Image: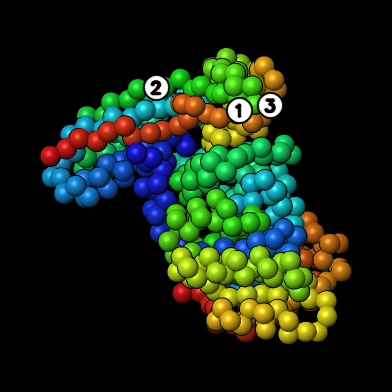
Amino acid sequence: MHEWSLAQAVIYTAIEYQKKNKLKKINEIKIKLGELQQIDREIFEFALKEIAHLKKIKASIKIKTEKAILKCRVCTHKWKFSEAIKKLDEDKREFIHFVPDLVHVYLRCPKCKSPDFEIIRGRGVWVESIKGD
Amino acid sequence: MDPRLNIIDERLKNIKRIIAVSGGKGGIGKSSIASALALILSKLNYRVGLLDLDFCGPSVHVILGVDDLFPKEEKGIIPPKICGIKFMSIIYYVSDEPSLLRGVDISNAIIELLAITRWGSLDFLIIDMPPGIGDPTLDVIRLMKRIEFLIISTQSKTALETVKKILKMLKELKVSILGIIENMRIVESSFVMDELKTFGVPFLGKINFDKSFEEAVGNPSKLLKTRFVQDLKKIVLNRSEFKGK
């Protein structure tokens, strides 16, 4: 249920946005879910609905997922997390789920074996846009 | 928009005081003091949390002998308790693997931990800071608005040089400085106090070098009996800076 805390962060972001922009209501929240964090979408959506209801936010929530791409800083090789994750056991996958940056602890560049790579995209939860009036 | 940034205040709202134990140089006793301070405050019946932010060299778990503990997942992460202290560290997720993280990754991991950790109500959250005045220091200053810095120095001229830089930076950023503790004192001298007098920061006290400390590492009951902890306890009991709110 770690998804709950991230869903709460999204709703708090919408509330903050509403306050800052002096909006009467929030109509739409667009969220991007980075694959690296391996969010359970069902739980996340349920949590979003529950927290939005509690906080009286009646917005349409649109979620899209983004594939995670990693790029080696040493040899510039790019690779997909979805391929690399197959080699990780359940525990390591879970650790990356809690703190996505720990991918550096458990993965290496498939080409040159370096741990010095960057997460180009698809890290975690991101609010793309909020609309309201 | 990074949603995690908007939940951190909510996660910290029931914590009365947040104290970052810092000092710049490695090996000057930041982790030992952070761990001992948490133990002392917990023994004084305060509700205490302890966060090890030294991701590249976490050591609080070694000092406190944390073994076989793992955070509970419940609408976030609930830190497990050791000796009554809620303890959070990256160590739960990296075990004995090295954390090969660059600055940007460290910042992201700090934000993640602050966004998902549910501390509940605490009188004190003690943070063991990594050496240096880079990303983690700037991150806690940015993300934890009520933070107070406890600065550790030794009699070493090299340690003092870095301490001066930290004090200068904290003063410039108008961050609250609780005071300075002189650790690992070997000779009777007012050198540290004299050198840092110009900063106008309270000199809280001194802790003598304690050879027996290393033997007590990993055993909180033994740690509490060391001269090191007794020296620190005197400072905590005698100084108003450590009173709960």
Q: Nearer the viewer, residue B201 or B54?
A: B201
Q: From what the image shows, is residue B74 above or below residue B16?
A: above
Labelled pair 1, 2 in contact (Cβ < 8 Å): no
Q: Is residue A35 visible?
A: yes
Q: Which numbered disc covers residue B96?
A: none
Q: Which residue is mark 2?
A: A65
Disc 1 and disc 3 in contact, CB within 8 angstroms: yes
For this view, does A17 lie left or right of residue A95?
Answer: left
Q: Residues within 10 Å of mark 3 (few under 14, many from 20)?
A: some
> Residue B119 in the image: x percent, y percent?
50, 54
Relative to B136, say whether B176 is above or below.
Answer: below
Q: Residue at x 69, y 55 (%)?
A: B60
- Give above or below for B65 relative to A10: below
Is B184 or B121 nearer to us in this picture? Answer: B184
x, y percentage for residue B152? 66, 69
Looking at marks 1 and 2 on the same chain, the residue that comes earlier in the sequence is marked by 2
Q: Which residue is mark 1?
A: A73
Query: For mark 3, what is the residue?
Result: A114
Give the chain of mark 1: A
Q: CA distance from mark 2 to mark 3?
A: 27 Å
| Dot 2 amino acid type | Thr
* Quadrant of residue B25 within the rendered picture: bottom right
Q: In the rendered structure, which amino acid carries the disc numbered 3? A: Ser
Secondary structure beneath dot 3 equals loop
At 55% from the left and 50% from the top, the residue drawn is B135
Residue drawn at 69 percent across, 70 percent down: B160
- How far across and how far down the image is residue A96, in percent? 57, 31
Residue B239 in the image, given as x and y percentages of width and height? 59, 82
The disc, 2 or 3, on the residue closer to the chain's N-terminal end is 2
Q: Earlier in the sequence, mark 1 or mark 3?
A: 1
Residue A88 visible in the picture: no
Label 1 packing within 10 angstroms: few (<14), some (14-19), many (20+): some
